[in-house]
Image: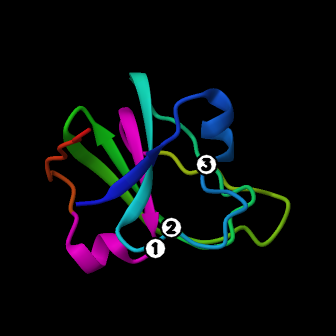
């Protein structure tokens, strides 16, 4: 179980976890969308590495683990292999630590 912040507005999605020093253990940020797409994410302003969990409906369809902090002004863009409607960002190493895998089901509680 993760406690997540929601990034709903375009401004919240653009900022994401940028300019923070860390993320508490078992916390994350969820980026929900109203349609599926191969959304692109970059690490602008990130001060710590993250795991990206790509979700379509209730299924984890891709994982990008240990995304590093950008070390130059040229920011790589990270995308899932398939279209998704949600992205969950967690502290790097969380996916491996708790055993998250492609094909796992996600339940969002409010």
Query: Is 32 drawn above or below residue 16 in the view shown?
Result: above
Image: magenta residue range: 80-100
Q: Which x, y percent locates residue 50?
A: 51, 67
Query: Is 64 drawn above or below residue 94 in the view shown?
Result: above
Q: Which x, y percent locates residue 47?
A: 69, 71
Q: Which residue is mark 1?
A: 92
User: How busy is the neighbourhood of tag 1: few (under 14 within 10 Å), some, or many (20 plus)?
Assistant: some
Helix or strand or loop: what does disc 3 sit on?
A: loop
Q: Which x, y percent locates residue 7?
A: 52, 39
Query: Is 102 drawn above or below residue 9 in the view shown?
Result: below
The answer to the question of whether label 1 and label 2 lie on touching residues, with beta carbons closer than 8 A, is yes
32 relative position to 75: left or right: left
The image quarter in which residue 51 lies: bottom left
Q: Quadrant of the C terminus?
A: top left
Report the disc number at residue 16. 3
Mark before the other along the chain sequence, 1 or 2? 2
């Amino acid at each position: 179980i993760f406690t997540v912040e929601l990034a709903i507005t375009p401004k919240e999605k653009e900022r994401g976890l940028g300019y923070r020093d860390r993320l508490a253990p078992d916390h994350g940020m969820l980026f929900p969308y109203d349609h599926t797409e191969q959304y692109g994410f970059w690490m602008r302003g990130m001060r710590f590495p993250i795991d990206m969990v790509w979700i379509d409906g209730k299924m984890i369809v891709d994982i990008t683990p240990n995304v590093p902090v950008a070390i130059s002004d040229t920011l790589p863009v990270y995308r899932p292999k398939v279209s998704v409607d949600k992205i969950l960002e967690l502290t790097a190493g969380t996916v491996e630590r708790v055993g998250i895998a492609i094909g796992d089901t996600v339940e969002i509680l409010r």
